[in-house]
Image (cartoon, rainbow, N blue to C red):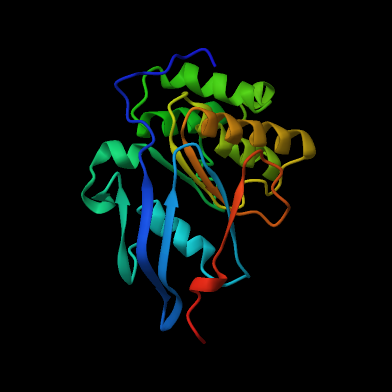
Amino acid sequence: MSHPIVSSAPGAGLLAAHSLACRRGRRLLFRGLDLQLERGSVTWLRGTNGSGKTSLMRILAGLSQPAEGEVTWDGTALRKAGSNAHQAIVYIGHSNALKDDLTLAEAVAFLAVLAGLDEPASRSRAALAHLGLSNRVDAPVRTLSQGQRRRGALARLVLDERPRSWVLDEPFDALDAASVGVLSRMIEANARRQGAVLLTSHQAVQIAGAREFDLEPWRAAS
């Protein structure tokens, strides 16, 4: 990437879950869950459909609140940790979160602004080039294929080189084999610079050093 690491920017802290419980409506999905996303780690979150994988990821990203327990960032409750902690956690869910009315470059630049980065336009184009989308930067998002949209959403991961905690829900969906390889190398690079990655995937995760975390032991009795 052409942009240097900004030393004053927030880096990857220790994101951890303590005795978490999660409800969906009246149903208790899991209880007593403990998880630490260590710096330099890649964790493959496993679980059957409906076990609460997406719910857990949204809680860890600060987008939902647990029924019980606490999420912490370097020992401080995430809800009190401030903007630096929230900027250092990147969540990409099933929705690609790209505005249909913008060009692809504009949509990713908007995400760079939200992340507090300088030079959002140039960062956007560099990130999209990394994902093989240089020829689509000026195309409206609504005209893109699902695979192109997914790669556009994933471009936010390489807007800069700060180590962050990535929380990625099925990031390989709609990607071809070449793009799966690019994303796998991006994940490995974030881990090498002492970021952390939590991801779900229906396909086997071929990433160096990845560990598995199964939700099954934490599931509440039905």
Furthest-right residue in this view: 177
Q: Residue at x 37, y 43 (%)?
A: 14
Q: Nearer the viewer, residue 99 or 162?
A: 162
> Up-down: is 196 above or below 93?
above
Q: Position of residue 177 (x, y in %)?
A: 78, 38
Q: Report the residue that reaches farthest toward the bottom.
A: 222
Q: Height in image: 39 above or below 8?
A: below
Q: Nearer the viewer, residue 157 or 206?
A: 206
**Residue 51: quadrant of the picture:** bottom right
Camera sees residue 56: yes
Q: Which residue does the image show at 31% across and 66% down from the upper left? A: 69
Where residue 176 appears, as percent x and y from the top left, is 77, 40
- In the picture, measured across the screen, residue 72 lies left or right of residue 98, that is left
| The N terminus, quarter of image | top right
Percent x, y for residue 21? 38, 71
> Where is 13 relative to 1, above or below?
below
Judge left or right: residue 107 versus residue 181: left
Tell me how many marks there are. 0
Q: Quadrant of residue 200?
A: bottom right
Measured from the top left, where is residue 214 in percent x and y?
A: 57, 64
- Foreground pick, 101 / 126: 126
Furthest residue toward left: 80
